[in-house]
Amino acid sequence: MKRDPWRRGKRRDDAGLNWIDTAAVYGLGHSETVVARAIDGRHPKPYVFTKCERTWNDKGEIIKCLKRDSVIRECEDSLRRLRAGVIDLYQIHWPEPEEDIEEGWEAVVRLREQGKIRWAGLSNCNAAQIERVRHLGVPASLQPPYSLVSREIEAETLPYCGANGIGVIAYAPMRNGLLTGSMSRERVANLAADDFRRRSPHFQEPNLTRNLALVEKLRAIGDRHGRTPGEVAIAWTLRRPEVTGAIVGLRNAGQVPGVIGAATFRLSEAELAELET
């Protein structure tokens, strides 16, 4: 979700969203295949962002790899699954193994020079890790987690990106559903045993009580403007000048009305102060 809805070439039935974020490892390649089918025949096509570094073996076991040959092979595989001639934004998913960050990033930069990708970005990196590779090529973007309850990047990473012209695409602005307004203590208690949120500190006490109280503050602010708690949470993320866009996960089209208003909604200084307290 960008700061303002995209207008150029916009159809009447278009909500203004113009990019899709995915990764090769999502569904072990299945997500990219689904994206290719979803955008087939659409004009204009949305931008497609995908990632390398997380690969897998014949048993479906996830492997962390930033070796040059692997990055190149992963890009070719993603191009094939996406049925694309070029990838709009190609990102290193995680800086792991950390000792291979430079090798992996250099490979991504070469892919850009070869025209296989339009833009090269990083994901889940801190300021020190970006600085390590910047001499090989300045990243177009960084994709970190950022929300009202996950603010670690404010101290160093956001200022670094702002100072070096690196766009920030924040993910999990509603913290895995926690800030949508639909999460309750009962729902958390009934999460499936294999749901990763059961192990997340944000969904455990004493944080859970504090976070649910924060949602009620989001709800109160949203009610004044006809916005959902989720839209207020996303708008809070977009308030930072370093943040170019926010990745919003949707399970179905029916969830769009609960988030789309965040693209144009602005929180007042007084409302930002409310949330800070």
Image: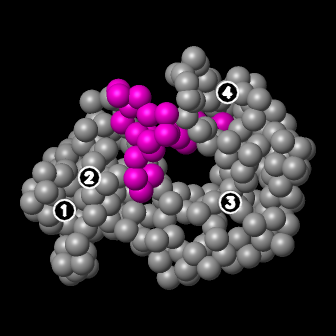
Bin the neighbour count of mark 3 within 10 Å (Cα to Cα): few under 14, some 14-19, many 20 and up.
some
The answer to whether residue 265 is above or below residue 127 is above
- At x 83%, y 55%, the residue is 109
Local secondary structure at mark 4 = helix
Disc 1 marks which amino acid? Leu
Residue 19 on image: x %, y %: 53, 40
| Residue at numbered disc 2 | 230
Label disc, if present, on residue 218 of the rendered structure: 1
Disc 3 marks which amino acid? Ala
Q: Nearer the viewer, mark 3 or mark 1?
A: 3
| Residue at numbered disc 3 | 140
Task: Pick whichever of labels 3 and 2 is earlier in the sequence.
Answer: 3
- Magenta span has 138? no
Disc 4 marks which amino acid? Leu
Local secondary structure at mark 2 = helix
Q: Is residue 191 left or right of residue 10?
A: left
Residue 196 visible, this orientation? no
Disc 2 marks which amino acid? Gly
Cβ atoms under marks 1 and 2 closer than 8 Å: yes
Local secondary structure at mark 1 = helix
| Residue at numbered disc 4 | 82
- At x 32%, y 60%, the residue is 235
Instruction: Identify the magenta region.
Output: 2-26
Residue 122 on image: x %, y %: 67, 58
Task: Pick whichever of labels 3 and 4 is earlier in the sequence.
Answer: 4
Local secondary structure at mark 3 = loop
Label disc, if present, on residue 112 of the rendered structure: none
- Rounded to the nearest angstrom, the CA distance separating label 1 from label 2 is 8 Å
Residue 123 on image: x %, y %: 62, 58
Residue 248 on image: x %, y %: 41, 46
